[in-house]
C-alpha cells in the first residue's frame, strides 16, 4: 500500500487540476455564472493548477523510470535464477551419475512432461522412459517427481526464501553456493 500512495496522490492532484480547467471551460461555454473573483486570484488558481499538472507529469515520469528499473532488475534476477537452475541441474545430474539418456528424461520430467510425451520426444517406448525415471529417482534418493523437483528448489532457495544469486564466473566459483 505504501508504494501505491504516491500514485494515488499524483492521480488526485492531476484530477483536481484537470477538474479546475474543465469546469472553467464548461462554465464559459454553458454560461454558468459564479460569484466573481479577482483576476489575481483567478491567475493564482490557474498557475497552481498548471503547476500541479506539470508536477504530476514530472513525478509520474520519475515513477515510470523507477518502475522500468525495477522491472529490469527483476528480469535480470530471473535470468540469473534460470542460469543458476540450469547449472544446478547439470551439477546434480553429474553427482548422481546419470547417463545422457537419463539426463534427458530427468530434464523433461522436471519440465512437467508426461511419460508418454517424453517417450514420444525421445522416440522410445513408455516402458523405457518409466525404467529410466525409476533409475533417476533411485540415484537421486527420491520416490517421485515432486521430491525430485523439490531437491532443486531447496538448493536454489536461501533460508530467507530469496533465490540464491548466480555465482560470478571466476575460477573459484566452481564451488556451489549453499
Image (tube, rainbow, N blue to C red):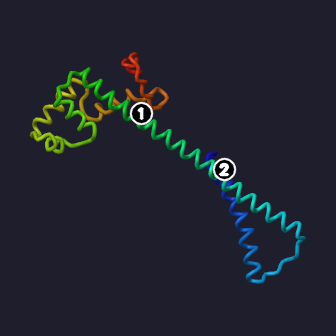
Label annotation for residue 53: none
- Pick the quarter of the image with the C terminus: top left
Residue at image point 58% right, 50% down? 64
Disc ID at residue 80: 1
**Residue for point 22% across, 28% down:** 137
**Above or below for 164 versus 171:** below
Q: Is residue 42 left or right of residue 10?
A: right
Residue 102 picture location, percent across and down: 18, 30
In which quarter of the view is residue 50 placed? bottom right
Q: Residue furthest top?
A: 172
Label 1, secondary structure: give it. Answer: helix
User: Left of 29 or right of it: where is 60?
Assistant: left
Percent across and percent down for residue 24 are: 76, 73
**85 lies above or below 116:** above
**Mark count:** 2
Picture coordinates of residue 66, whole percent (x, y) = 59, 44
Residue matched to label 2:
6
Q: CA distance from mark 2 to mark 1?
A: 31 Å
Q: Residue furthest bottom?
A: 31
Give how far across and how far down residue 160 sits, in percent. Answer: 49, 29
Disc 2 is placed on an element classified as helix
Amino acid at each position: 500500500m505504501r508504494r501505491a500512495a504516491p500514485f494515488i496522490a499524483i492521480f488526485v492532484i492531476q484530477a483536481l487540476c484537470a477538474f479546475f480547467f474543465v469546469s472553467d471551460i464548461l462554465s464559459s461555454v454553458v454560461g454558468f455564472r459564479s460569484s466573481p473573483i479577482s483576476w489575481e486570484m483567478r491567475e493564482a488558481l490557474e498557475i497552481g493548477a498548471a503547476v500541479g499538472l506539470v508536477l504530476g507529469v514530472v513525478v509520474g515520469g520519475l515513477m515510470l523510470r523507477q518502475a522500468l528499473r525495477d522491472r529490469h532488475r527483476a528480469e535480470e534476477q530471473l535470468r540469473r535464477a534460470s542460469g543458476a537452475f540450469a547449472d544446478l541441474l547439470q551439477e546434480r545430474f553429474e553427482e548422481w551419475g546419470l547417463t545422457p539418456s537419463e539426463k534427458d528424461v530427468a530434464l523433461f520430467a522436471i519440465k512437467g512432461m508426461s511419460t508418454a510425451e517424453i517417450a514420444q520426444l525421445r522416440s522410445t517406448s513408455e516402458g523405457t522412459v518409466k525404467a529410466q525415471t525409476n533409475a533417476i529417482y533411485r540415484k537421486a534418493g527420491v520416490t517421485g517427481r515432486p521430491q525430485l523437483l523439490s531437491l532443486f528448489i531447496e538448493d536454489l532457495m536461501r533460508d530467507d526464501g530469496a533465490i540464491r544469486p548466480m555465482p560470478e564466473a571466476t575460477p573459484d566459483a566452481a564451488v556451489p553456493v549453499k
